[in-house]
């Protein structure tokens, strides 16, 4: 792996992720200069994402092509207004909200955190040598400014193991390749709140 060209390393890392069918990606990303925790579990085409920003928490669940979202009361207040959130926020925060047909807002947001999409976006990376990370031999890929990195395993399957910053805030770790995530399932009917279509 370490001897391959960068495009081929990235291709093999993406293929390994696809073949694994499931993985857990957790850490932090930087959004508008602020760290935001991210916890993503993927199983086949289904995902469960949790993230927060400015004290507001959002969960996105995608099962069989349908995306649901759950927001805490603070985020709901920013989405639907404080008065409505005060009246019904507690109930809504416990429900999985189903967007109206044709609304791609939440599905598109969830897709931004797909690791395969992140790998495909890495342009201009160069090899920065090899090292051992958490007991795993890896080849290091880095951007020209040496601020972003990707660690890819050089033994066993060529899984991506770390992405983002070299140290500290802004790094994401890959674990649990091939694991079962029973929590990734469609909500029960009494847990779903169907949102009405937006008025034109």
Image (cartoon, rainbow, N blue to C red):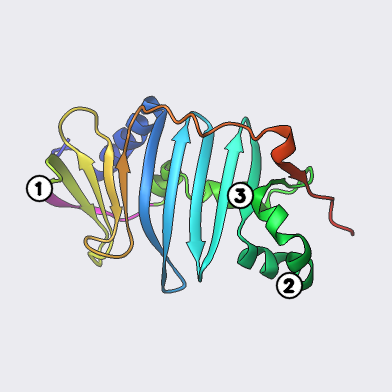
Q: What element does badge 2 sit on?
A: helix
Q: Considering only vertical position in the picture, is 38 above or below 64?
A: below
Would you say 106 lies left or right of 153 here? right
- Asked if the magenta segment contains residue 194, the reply would be no
What residue is at 65 percent from the left and 50 percent from the top? 94
Res 198 → quadrant: bottom right
**Spatial distance from mark 3 to mark 2, Cα to Cα?**
26 Å
The residue segment tinted magenta is: 122-131
Decide: few, some or many residues near mark 1? Use Cα within 10 Å; few <14, some 14-19, many ≥20: some
> Which residue carries the number 3 mark?
108
* Point 68% across, 33% down: residue: 188
Q: Is residue 145 above or below residue 138?
A: below
Q: Earlier in the sequence, mark 1 or mark 3?
A: 3
> Disc number at residue 131?
1
Q: Nearer the viewer, mark 2 or mark 1?
A: 2
Q: Residues within 10 Å of mark 2 (few under 14, many from 20)?
A: some
Q: Is residue 95 left or right of residue 20?
A: right
The tag on residue 82 is: 2
Give the number of the disc on residue 195: none
| Residue 124 place in picture, x, y as percent | 31, 56
Give the Cα distance between marks 2 and 1: 51 Å
Q: Secondary structure at mark 3?
A: helix
Q: Is residue 111 left or right of residue 83?
A: left
Q: Secondary structure at mark 1?
A: strand
Instruction: State yes or no: discs 1 and 3 in contact (Cβ < 8 Å).
Output: no
Q: Earlier in the sequence, mark 2 or mark 1?
A: 2
């Amino acid at each position: 792996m370490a001897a391959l060209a960068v495009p081929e390393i990235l291709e093999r890392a993406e293929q390994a992720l696809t073949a694994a069918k499931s993985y857990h990606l957790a850490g932090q990303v930087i959004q508008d200069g602020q760290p935001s925790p991210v916890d993503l579990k993927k199983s086949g085409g289904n995902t469960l994402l949790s993230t927060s920003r400015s004290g507001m928490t959002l969960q996105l669940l995608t099962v069989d092509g349908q995306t649901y979202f759950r927001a805490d009361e603070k985020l709901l207040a920013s989405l639907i207004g404080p008065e409505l959130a005060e009246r019904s926020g507690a109930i809504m925060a416990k429900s999985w909200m189903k967007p109206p047909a044709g609304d791609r807002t939440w599905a598109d947001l969830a897709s931004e955190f797909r690791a395969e999409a992140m790998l495909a976006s890495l342009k201009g990376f160069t090899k920065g040598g090899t090292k051992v990370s958490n007991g795993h031999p890896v080849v290091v890929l880095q951007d020209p400014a040496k601020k972003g990195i990707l660690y890819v395993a050089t033994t066993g399957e060529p899984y991506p193991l770390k992405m983002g910053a070299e140290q500290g805030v802004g790094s994401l770790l890959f674990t649990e390749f091939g694991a079962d995530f029973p929590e990734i399932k469609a909500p029960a009917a009494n847990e779903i709140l169907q949102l009405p279509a937006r008025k034109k």
